[in-house]
Each structure stands twice: as structure tokens, then as C-alpha cells.
Amino acid sequence: MVKIKVQKAMKNTIIKNIFGLGIYRILGVITNFLLLGIIYRYLPNEETYGIWLTVFSILSWLALFDFGMGNSLRNKLTEALSNENYELAKKYISTTYIIMIIPSFLMLILAFVFVEIIEWKSLFNIQETAITEYYLKVFILTVALLYIVNFYLSILFALLHATYKSYLISAMQLLINVINIILVLMLYFIDIDSLLILGITYLGSSIIVSGVMSLFVFNSNKQVLKPQINFFQKSLLNDILNFGLKFLVLQMAIIVLFNTDNLLISKFISVKEVTPYQLIYKLLSIFTIILSIILTPIWTLIINYNTQQEFKKIREVFRKLFIIYGILMFGVIIIGLISPHIIKIWIGEEIFIHPNLILSIIIFTAMHMWCNIFQAILNGMNKLNVQMYSYGIATIINIPISIYLVLNTGMGVTGIVIGTIISLSFPSIILPWYTLRNFRSNE
């Protein structure tokens, strides 16, 4: 009877989490679209907007420097809380917060070095004479430093995921978007046209919100969630890092696979072409976001089921996710077909997007969502090796194939996307095969 009540309570928690995530994420998507449109109008031309998109795409690579410890903490903390081992949970939290100071400091050093030695105008293929190399270096260094601070504060997300409060992450992003919309509109109307000020505003609001939320979460449950130096446990480092390094390799592969297209477009075609690519990509990513709303608490749920060896329930979750995938794919196709009209309304002007580019991004989105389903299940079951190998292969071949297609086929941006599609076919096939094999072995 007690077990049934616990399971029912967990199910209610998952439903509430998905519902909360859904509301905040939908509002977050709406405000993010508004923010992108406002930033597009705020910046003087498409090339400057392309710089903005490309720089932040590159900054996302800095997430690698957590060495997978964020996701490792999420899994280990969920397991400890599932077993009601609250002292161990606090040790995991404290150890992770303290050890993460090292990669954050390392990033600070590397930011100064790389910003100085790289010729950014040449890298981005920038023709705009008003943007000097010096200004670009100052802009990139400033946003990199702010991004690193925000990166450290994001350890909080692991705590929120493990305690079934993932919806707070979406609530934070919604608040950040609203603040940024207000601030960027103020900059727009008082006619302050500056990439640097925009970067400081954009990331500064995120740092403030994340910092305040961290203090709130720590003080709401000091006995378990608040990190303390005396709970640092050196013996847990190997446990966190060994598991974390697998997540690191996986993160590295995924970041390179999904975040190099902007740079390749800038370098081999034109930074102006980043804009139409990103607009259609952002529009169809709505469905990836909807799926992630569902998968976020599911990952934590799978960890619990795996800890309790309730494999039948994991298979039931998978079957439901497969149905959801089919529904979302219908939406991807419809929105993809009418995307030029939506984008015209969204940004206030007509931008030509080749039908082949739209079709290729529809296929890419379908494969991306397909892989995400199996990733969530395998992450929860601590099955990371097969993901590392499949995404590793995809990452190794992605850039060479994309460059070859764009230089030799005349397909332009579409060639780069097709290169990513070809690369993504490896995890798209291998992950389902491995997952179904695990289901059969646990029957």
C-alpha cells in the first residue's frame, strides 16, 4: 500500500512538473521569439546580427568545461535522494560546487588567451568596416567572462532536476527573457546601438536571476541542498569525475555536432546567411523544446525506476514517448511548410529561405528529436558508452562532410545542414537498437 502511494505521488509530481514546465516553457518560447525579433531590429544590419548569433553559438561550447559534472551530479544526487541518503546528497552537492571552481578559473585564463590570439574578423568573414578588430575582441572577451560566471551558477540546475523542480529552470529563463525584452527595448528607443552593451545586458540579467535563485534554493533546504566546505568529500571525486567524463565526451560531441553550423556558414558562405538559417532553425526548435519539456522530468524518473530495477515501467514510458514523437512530427511538417509566412510576421520583413533549406531542417529536427528520446532513457539508465561512440562518430565526420558539400555541390547552407543530417544518422540508428536490446535483456 505504501509503495502504491509513493508511486502515485511520484506520478503526480511528474505531471505537475511537465505541466509547470509546459506553461513556463511556452511563455519562455514566446518571449524568446519576441526578444530575438527585438534584437534583430535593435542591431543595425544582418551581418551584425549574424555576429551576435555566431558568438553566442561558440560560447555554448564553454559548457564542456564542467567535465560532465553537472549531469553527473544530477544522476548521483537523484540516486542518493531516491535512497533517502541525505548526507550523501549534501556531500555530492558540496564536492561538485567546490571542484567546479577549477574549470571556471581555467576558462577565465583561456578566454583571455584565445580572444587575443584569434583574428575574429577574418574568422567570421566580416565585411562591415564599422566593426573593428579591437571592438570585436572587447565584445567577445566581455561576454565570455559574463558567460563563465553564469556557467558556474548553472550548477543549480542539477539540484532542481534531481528534486523534481525542473520547472523552476524554465521559470528563471522566462523571467530573464522578460527582463531582457524590457532592457533591449529601452536601449532601442534611446538609440544606443552597441553590441557590447547588448551583451552585458543580455548576460547580466541571467547572472542576477541565477544568483538570487541559488540563494533561495539553498536557504529553502539548508540541511540537504546548501553546499558547505566541511561536506567536501575527496573520495567522491572519482565517482563524480568518472561518470562526468562520459557525459563530457557526449556533451562535446553534441555541442560540436549541433553548434558548428553557424561558424561554418560564416566562414565558407557569409555571416549574413546565418540569419535565415537561424530563423527557420529557431522556429522548428519549438518542437524540440516541447519534447524536452516532457523529457526533462522523465530523465529523473528513469533514474528512479532504474535504481529500483523497475524495467517494465521504463518500457511503458518509452511507448508513450514514441506516440508523443509522432504527434510532434506532424506539427514540425506543418509549421515547416508555412514557415516563410510565420517568419515574415515574426521579424517584420520578408527574408528569402530556399525550400531545400526548409526541407533539410525539417529532417534534421525529426532526427534530433528522435535521438533525444533515446538519450533521455539511456541517460537515466546510466548507459553512456554507446552514446559516446555513436555521437563520437557523428562528430568526427560532421565538419569534413559539411565542408565538402558546401564547397563541391553548390547547395550552400543546405549542404551544411545535409552534412549534419548524414552525421546524425549514426546515433539515429545505433541508439534505438541498443535501447531495444536492453529492454529485451531485462524482460
Image: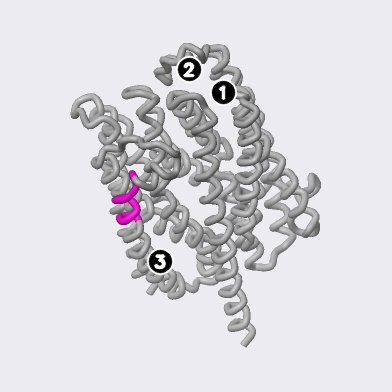
Number of residues whose C-alpha sits closer than 10 Å to that of mark 3, classed few (under 14), some (14–19) or many (20 or more)? some
Q: Position of residue 215 (x, y in %)?
A: 77, 49
Judge by depth and name the residue closer to the eye, 381 or 59: 59
Q: Is residue 363 visible?
A: yes
* Residue depicted at x 44% and y 39%: 348
Badge nearest the viewer, 1 or 3:
1
Mark 1 vs mark 2, CA separation in Å: 9 Å
Q: Quadrant of the C terminus?
A: bottom left
As drawn, the label of residue 80 is: none
* Residue depicted at x 49% and y 15%: 118
Q: Position of residue 148 (x, y in %)?
A: 63, 33
Q: Do callouts 1 and 3 mark residues in contact (Cβ within 8 Å)?
A: no
Number of residues whose C-alpha sits closer than 10 Å to that of mark 2, classed few (under 14), some (14–19) or many (20 or more)? some
Q: Is residue 81 above or below residue 418?
A: below
Q: Position of residue 439 (x, y in %)?
A: 37, 68
Mark 1 vs mark 3, CA separation in Å: 40 Å
Chain-order first, disc 3 or disc 2: 2
Q: Is residue 45 above or below residue 438?
A: above
Q: Which residue is mark 1?
A: 140
Chain-order first, disc 1 or disc 3: 1
Q: Do callouts 1 and 2 mark residues in contact (Cβ within 8 Å)?
A: yes
Our reading of the magenta stretch's main secondary structure is helix
Number of residues whose C-alpha sits closer than 10 Å to that of mark 1, classed few (under 14), some (14–19) or many (20 or more)? many
Q: Which residue is mark 3?
A: 321
SS under mark 3: helix
Q: What amino acid is found at the position of numbered circle 3 in the picture?
A: Leu
Q: Which residue is mark 2?
A: 120
Report the magenta residues as a range.
Answer: 332-340
Q: What amino acid is found at the position of numbered circle 2 in the picture?
A: Trp
- Residue 222 appears left or right of 137: right
Q: What amino acid is found at the position of numbered circle 1 in the picture?
A: Ile
From this viewpoint, which residue is outermost toward the bottom?
Answer: 1
